[in-house]
Image (tube, rainbow, N blue to C red):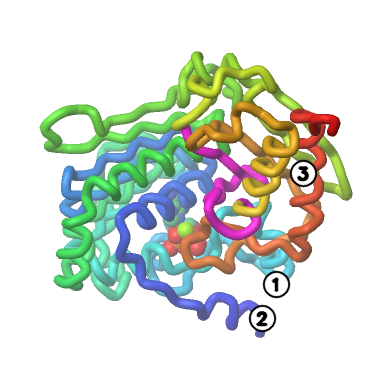
Amino acid sequence: QTTIRTLGSTQVLTDPASVVKELIDNALDAHATSLAIEISNNTLDLIQLRDNGHGIPPEDRHLVARPHCTSKIGSEDDLKDIGRSSLGFRGEALASVAEVSGSLTISTRTEGEQVATALKINRQGEVTGQERASLPVGTTVKIVDFIKSHPVRRQVALKATEKTLKKIKQLLQSYAFARPHVRLSLRVLKAKTDKGNWMYAPKPGGNAEDAAFKVVGAACASQCTWSVLEEHGFTIHAFLPRVDADPAKVSNTGSFISVDARPVTASRGTAKQLMKAFKEALRQAGSPLQGSKELFILLEVQCPRASYDANVEPAKDDVLFEDPDIAVAAARHLFEAVYPAKQP
Ligand code: ADP
Ligand code: MG
């Protein structure tokens, strides 16, 4: 019963950045280690992600874009643990994309198959055609004419092109930190310059520090230091500007927070409270960093089992903690250790 109710929450995807996020989550859930995104310069004509994950098994293909179909839940118990085992389980991202787009094609090949299969999918999410395709193991999702069926939303989206492309780049950066072993690339097609293109190529194994050097640059990363704190089952790894860091070098980069390797948006929910605790610690320490805009901070929060629900927010950029105060207190203690309060 619970399963049906939870999966019943529907949401229509209309923002290209949210679509990219859903595609990334699917690729990561398929254990991909390389994700290549191509998007047209207006963010609507084409949105494509190619991954090297395990592909979609032939027996699942007819259901891939049907509403409420997911391969990620076997039992009700899975629902409780889903925050760890997968990035999404609502089974509606692809169905929603199919419904509003001009066309959706999913090409996929599993280990052991000689060729890939390109599936043509209609608005109802049904597979209407299959063709052989020559692709390596993995999955490519190709969306053409996104939100074709919503002319008003289309107009709105076309006005926000620059903003959307920036949002996608920030999204990719946050995944580089949350999953530093995964290769990511973004190509903006038909753009006048290649300024919008972006890439993160990890060194073998990849780690968050490597990601920091590559994503925000050595000037910033070399001003930072690691600290770790364990409290009430939570473990927090933080890469933070040192007390004596040069404020100019560690600002204007943004904040990168992940919960169990799932990026969350720093301006919302518990992540917002974590940021508040960070700023409060800087204030109490009388740190020269406190005036800086978009100060660099990298926080990786590892949580005890079943301490939050990651599927409450439609945008999946926030998690709902059973008791957010515990995580926030742990972070506060870490910040206070890194930035000791000035003695009065
Ligand atoms: P959900 O991710 O919530 O299950 P989606 O609509 O995003 O729902 O995807 C539906 C199903 O399609 C997934 O459960 C998964 O089995 C399959 N799938 C989607 N994208 C991929 C991919 N890149 N690689 C492998 N399987 C995929
Ligand atoms: Mg999904």
Locate the N terminus by quadrant. Answer: bottom right
Provide residue 306's location: percent of width, then percent of height.
76, 60
Q: Are marks 1 and 3 in contact (CB under 8 Å)?
A: no
In the image, what residue type sits under mark 3?
Answer: Arg
In which quadrant of the rendered view does residue 261 lie? top right
Crowding near the residue tagged with mark 3, few <14, some 14–19, many ≥20 C-alpha atoms within 10 Å: many
Residue extent of the magenta highlight: 253-271
**Which residue is more in the foreground, 116 or 257?**
257
Q: Is residue 263 magenta?
A: yes
Residue marked by disc 1: 76
Q: Nearer the viewer, mark 3 or mark 2?
A: 3
User: Which residue shows up at 67% across the image and 39% down it?
Assistant: 300
Q: Is residue 245 magenta?
A: no
In which quadrant of the rendered view does residue 159 lie? bottom left
Provide residue 34's location: percent of width, then percent of height.
44, 33
3D distance between C-alphas at marks 3 and 2: 36 Å
Q: Is residue 34 visible?
A: yes
3D distance between C-alphas at marks 2 and 1: 7 Å
Q: Are marks 3 and 2 in contact (CB under 8 Å)?
A: no
Residue marked by disc 2: 2
Residue marked by disc 3: 332
The residue tagged with tag 2: helix, strand or loop? Answer: helix
In the image, what residue type sits under mark 1?
Answer: Glu
Q: Earlier in the sequence, mark 2 or mark 1?
A: 2
Provide residue 154's location: percent of width, then percent of height.
18, 65
